Image (tube, rainbow, N blue to C red):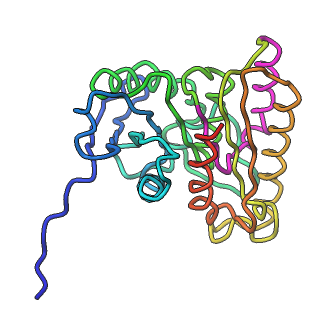
Amino acid sequence: MWKEVPRAATGTFYHVDAPAIGDTLEISVIEPFPGAASVGKQFPAIYVLDPSATLDIVVGTKRLFDIFSGGSLPLAYIVGIGYADPDVTGRRFRDFTPSVAPLPDGISLASPFGLGGASRYLAFIRNEIVPHLESILPLAPHERALLGYSLSGLFAAHVLFRHPDAFDRYLVISPSLWWDNASIFKDEEAWAGSNADLPAKVLFVVGDAEEQPGGDWRNNLPDEVVLPLKPVSHVRGLSNRLASRRYAGLRMKTAFIPGGRHITVFPAAVGLGLVEMFAL
């Protein structure tokens, strides 16, 4: 006999008005285990961008590792930072891009919300979201991790070079470093010109097939559009440049997933990333 039963709640969800952005955000909070808030200790927090597409993979992978890793990974809260409105495409370009710039040839996108809002979005995360969550949950202030993928990976790199102290660990997966003629390299250069150190733990992960024919897989973009964006070359170039700075406080690793394409690489990158990020 089959009997439908209600599913246990998988997390707590908040809608947060963000007038500075002109939107309402949806914040998802997943406990490391039921009742974690009552055990009298603080936990790391993994802040996941693009949660409508990525959160389930991160949560499922972390739970699997919590069962089988023998305690080698810390128990952690997982926090999704997304949108109350399910129409996310234009919002992503508004909030994850650091500058206003034309789209590359072959990519067309209606931009009803504008572009170049990354600094404003970061300010809201730093000043509103993180402090509030740390005031109501047992989150360790010096154990914050940020996970970004594709366009939100660009945002994670932007945070790294503007306010690296906002997070302690960065998992940057297949980032869209091509934005605005790869202006992220100018951001890196500006940081290096004004700072003697970059205190952060950073893991870059990209699929090694992303810069090959078919590297975008079934994302409806032809090779002649995708290949000039040089996703692998940009990640390699940025990580090499950071390594050359010899920052005392930077612990960094770059990984290339064999056969990984831009759409297919994410699950493997999360599995590798959770392990390597906490090992840095």
Residue shown at 79%/22% (left/top)? 247
Report if residue 79 is visible in the image.
no
Report whether 181 appears left or right of 39.
Answer: right
Report whether 217 appears left or right of 229.
Answer: left
Report whether 76 appears left or right of 254.
Answer: left
Q: Residue furthest bottom?
A: 1
Location of the N terminus by quadrant is bottom left
Residue shown at 69%/50% (left/top)? 205
Q: Nearer the viewer, residue 122 or 47?
A: 47
Residue shown at 47%/41% (left/top)? 74
Q: Is residue 62 above or below residue 209?
A: above
Q: Is residue 68 above or below residue 133?
A: below
- First to last magenta residue range: 169-194
Whether 172 is among the magenta residues is yes
Count of picture labels: 0
Quadrant of res 28: top left
Image location of residue 19, percent across then percent down: 36, 24
